[in-house]
Image: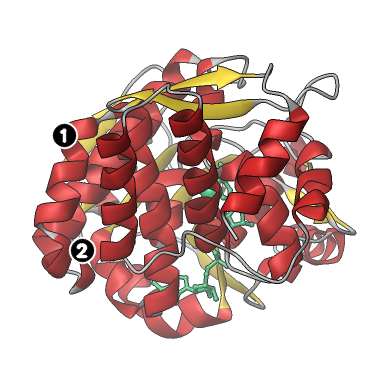
Amino acid sequence: MEKIKNRVCKVFIDNSYKSFNIALEKTNINDVYDAVLIITDQNVYNSQLNKFVASIKAKTIYEYIIPHGEESKSLEVYEEIMKYCIKINLSRKSVIIALGGGVVGDLVGFVASTYMRGIDVIQVPTTLLAQVDSSIGGKTGINLGNLKNIIGTFYQPKFTYTNVESLKTLPYKEFLGGMAEVIKYGFIYDYEFLNYLVENSENILDRDTECLFYIVEKCASIKAHIVEQDENEGGLRKILNFGHTFGHGVEKLCGISHGEAVSIGMHMAFKLSLKEEFIEEKYYNKFVEVCKLYDLPLTFEGIDEEKVFEVMKNDKKNSFSKINLVLPVGLGRVEIMNNIKETLIIDIIKRCK
Ligand code: NAD
Ligand code: ZN
């Protein structure tokens, strides 16, 4: 079992659920939880729950299953879970475990942060995206109408426990989507890591355990390190939005997945940096090579670039109507810029059609 630990984040990584109990004992030394509530979605229930439950030693274990998909990040599902917590008398000495992808993690984190003014939560991520990103850092949230994550909190889990083997039941498309985030870490923080992703692409796509372990550990460490330095997203943490601001528009308008949108968004950022001569052409070519190896798209179709730009502009992550762009400026390095002309941004979006 590998452990990443800093002032803010604690992450255990293993290739089974067996050491979950050890992680629990290590972090719950003076106290023993009176009850454990596991919340998961229907797909994860089918593929992971039995294996996970077999690894827990607890007096009382409750299970609650929500429908899978983004729609579950709603006030209605939140209310149903709250009512269930009250019905089973969940107390401040209990713990809630989020077993699933980012949807379960965000929703359950929010439930835990608000039930009785906050009870302990443990994240057990089962998608690649959740293992390398959403389960670390303490952002929780639900949606209201079409406003994503508009209601939420910063609330750190007691710890994150990752079993990389759980990725073997993940649908291929979800795995590839997670790879867009994995690649992102290389370009924002660790150029050497990209060579690993190029050299081992076949084994990674075959979901070889050793490769999964390596990439999850690498990305989780980078994320934990960034979060430690900027827990409430005042500065550095914004570099994690690389590909996301540009990608936001195409994700909303083109009906593509989050990972695909991030890949296209990173491409737009690369094109802009190339045009402004922040980077050399061979670095741009490296980006294209990595994305192609993982079957990630670089272009979109069918939508007007002005419309894509409008959605980008309305992203809640922009400050005072200035668009914050995360742009590559060197090997494994990005910078946040908010002075790029709108006409140039629109032109770049057009070049990615
Ligand atoms: P998801 O949770 O919807 O999971 C994707 C699909 O895979 C679902 O159908 C799920 O049931 C299924 N699944 C999950 N694990 C499985 C497994 N091991 N085997 C088989 N099927 C499995 O999607 P996601 O991509 O993990 O998360 C997306 C969410 O994460 C979004 O709501 C986004 O806003 C949020 N997010 C949050 C943060 C954060 O910092 N809190 C960061 C990034 C994204
Ligand atoms: Zn993302």
Name the residue tied to disc 1. Answer: 192
> Would residue 173 be seen by someone viewing this image from the given angle?
yes
Considering only order in the chain, which callout, 1 or 2, is on the residue closer to the N terminus? Answer: 2
**Element under label 1?**
helix
Residue visible at 80% across and 37% down in the picture: 313
State the image coordinates of residue 249 (x, y, percent, origin top left).
72, 52
State the image coordinates of residue 330 (x, y, percent, origin top left).
33, 22
Q: Nearer the viewer, residue 296 or 274?
A: 274
Which disc number belongs to residue 22? none
Residue visible at 52% across and 54% down in the picture: 264
Give me the C-alpha separation between circle 2 and circle 1.
28 Å
Residues packed near mark 2 inside 10 Å, few (<14), some (14 to 19) or many (20 plus): some
Identity, as a three-letter code, of the amino acid under mark 2: Ser
Name the residue tied to disc 2. Answer: 16
**Element under label 2?**
loop
Query: Image height check: is 329 above or below 99?
Result: above
Identity, as a three-letter code, of the amino acid under mark 1: Glu
